[in-house]
Image (cartoon, helix red, strand yellow):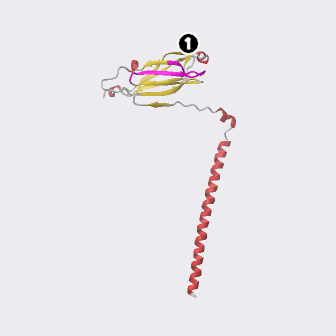
Amino acid sequence: MSSSWVRRGLFSLSLSVIVGVVGAFGFAAGWMSQASQDDRSAVSAVDSSIPADLLAQVNLQADSASTGKTMAMVTGRIDGDVEGLYVLDFTTGNLFCWVLNQRGGGFMAQYMTNVRNDFGPLEQGRNPEYLLVTGFVNVAGGAGADGRPADSVVYVADANSGAVVGYSLVWNRARAAAGGAQGGGLIKVAQGLARDANLIRQ
């Protein structure tokens, strides 16, 4: 009698455990499904809150840069339709800006300067080390017969001295639209020192 009662008790206990486990799994699955639906609803609500005509006007623009031990390069906007590629050779100090031909392949414009002219000669025993970035600028006025200043300034920093120099160029949009070649020198437009002069030689 007692043995039968124990068997019935164990059976009831096992059944309760199984039902409990299945119920827990069911609850977890339902909760995860609901959370997923809530997430999708939230995303849909955010997406639908942005007007379609506004999304169509979004125009992402970003400059890109890369640097190595002996060379650095960065892109910068020349005008609303085209970017320039700035390349600095650490060994020679030559800084170039090339602009693609919008009417076909190849570069149609080349500008150049040597940053050593502004940073001075490299100290004995030091290796040249530079940083290169671009920044957007919309120069008020400034247009002349040869064109107008580009929409970007390229900033070069000399890691040895802490000196920083900004360069720009004159761009002729009408000549570019016609596919005509242009170029010249990069023009120094800004200069600064990012390090205490007393620390430069230490």
Closer to the camera in the image, 197 or 54: 54
In the image, residue 145 sits, relative to residue 162, either above or below, namely: above
- Residue ID for mark 1: 146
In the image, residue 1 sits, relative to residue 77, either above or below, namely: below
Res. 21 in view: yes
The furthest residue to the top: 145
**In x, y percent, where is residue 55?**
66, 36
Q: Mark 1, residues whose alpha carbon is within 10 Å: few (<14), some, or many (≥20)?
A: few
Q: Which element type, helix, strand or loop, lies under badge 1?
A: loop
Q: Residue visible at 34% across and 27% down?
A: 127
The furthest residue to the front: 105
Q: Residue visible at 59% across and 78% down?
A: 11
Mark 1 belongs to which amino acid? Asp
**In x, y percent, where is residue 33?**
63, 56
Q: Quadrant of the N terminus?
A: bottom right
- State the extent of the magenta-drawn residues as a range: 91-110
In the image, residue 108 sits, relative to residue 55, either above or below, namely: above
Q: Quadrant of the C terminus?
A: top left
Q: Residue visible at 58% across and 67% down?
A: 21
